[in-house]
């Protein structure tokens, strides 16, 4: 089973969202940024590496939030809390980034603006933001 790890990066009570640029099915939708865990890598290390690569930000990964979400038969998506320890997120692979509170997050979910897999974590995330 391969894993994709996504970061619930929370700073000053706001959650970091990144807007996908590909593939076409999810381009324009917003996600918790992350990527695939490589062979021999921990989830935490993978998340720290991916956020440095994609957003130029140094984070420290923490505990898992929410449930694992199956993406394919052999691929599961997990979310870890993460704290920024250096830098300011600047999108390189994403179209944009934004910081949202619980209200804006709920509105985006209601409007279908979140990547479907990540929408599963709505209540877990909203709780962390209130
Ligand atoms: O970002 P990347 O393309 O490496 O992600 C691998 C897979 O995980 C894709 O299918 C992507 O849609 C999915 N994913 C997701 N939610 C995230 C991050 C990735 O559904 N927060």
Image: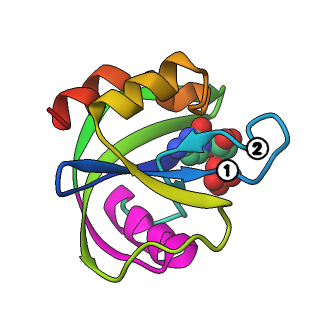
Quadrant in the picture for residue 114: top right
Q: Position of residue 7 (x, y in %)?
A: 38, 52
Sequence-first disc among 1 and 2: 1
Can you tell me which quadrant of the image ligand 1 is in?
top right
Q: Position of residue 49 (x, y in %)?
A: 45, 74
Q: Nearer the viewer, residue 41 or 123?
A: 123
Q: Residues within 10 Å of mark 1 (few under 14, many from 20)?
A: many
Queried whether the magenta region covers residue 35, the answer comes back as: no
Q: Which residue is mark 1?
A: 20
Residue at 32% in and 28% down: 103
Q: Position of residue 105 (x, y in %)?
A: 39, 32
Q: Are marks 1 and 2 in contact (CB under 8 Å)?
A: yes
Magenta-highlighted stretch: main secondary structure? Answer: helix
Q: Looking at the picture, does residue 52 appear above or below residue 130?
A: below
Q: Which residue is mark 2?
A: 27
Q: Circle 1 — which element?
A: loop
Task: Determine whether the beta carbon of the residue marked 1 sits less than 8 angstroms from the nearest atom of ligand 1.
Answer: yes
Q: Position of residue 130 (x, y in %)?
A: 14, 32
Q: Residues within 10 Å of mark 2 (few under 14, many from 20)?
A: some
Residue at 53% in and 47% down: 4
Residue at 78% in and 50% down: 22
Q: Which residues are magenta?
A: 43-61
Q: Circle 2 — which element?
A: loop
Q: CA distance from mark 1 to mark 2?
A: 5 Å
99 left or right of 114 in image: left
Q: Looking at the picture, does residue 90 appear above or below residue 81?
A: below
Residue at 17% in and 57% down: 12
């Amino acid at each position: 089973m391969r894993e994709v790890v996504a970061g619930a990066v929370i700073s000053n009570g706001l959650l970091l969202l990144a807007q996908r640029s590909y593939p076409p099915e999810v381009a324009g939708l917003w996600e918790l940024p992350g990527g695939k865990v490589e062979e021999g890598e921990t989830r935490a290390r993978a998340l720290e590496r991916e956020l440095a690569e994609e957003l130029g930000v140094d984070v420290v990964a923490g505990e898992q939030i929410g449930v694992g979400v199956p993406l394919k038969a052999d691929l599961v998506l997990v979310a870890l809390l993460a704290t920024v320890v250096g830098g300011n997120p600047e999108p390189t692979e994403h179209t944009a980034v934004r910081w949202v509170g619980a209200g804006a997050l709920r509105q985006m979910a209601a409007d279908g603006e979140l990547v479907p897999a990540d929408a599963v974590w709505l209540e877990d995330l909203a709780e962390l933001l209130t």
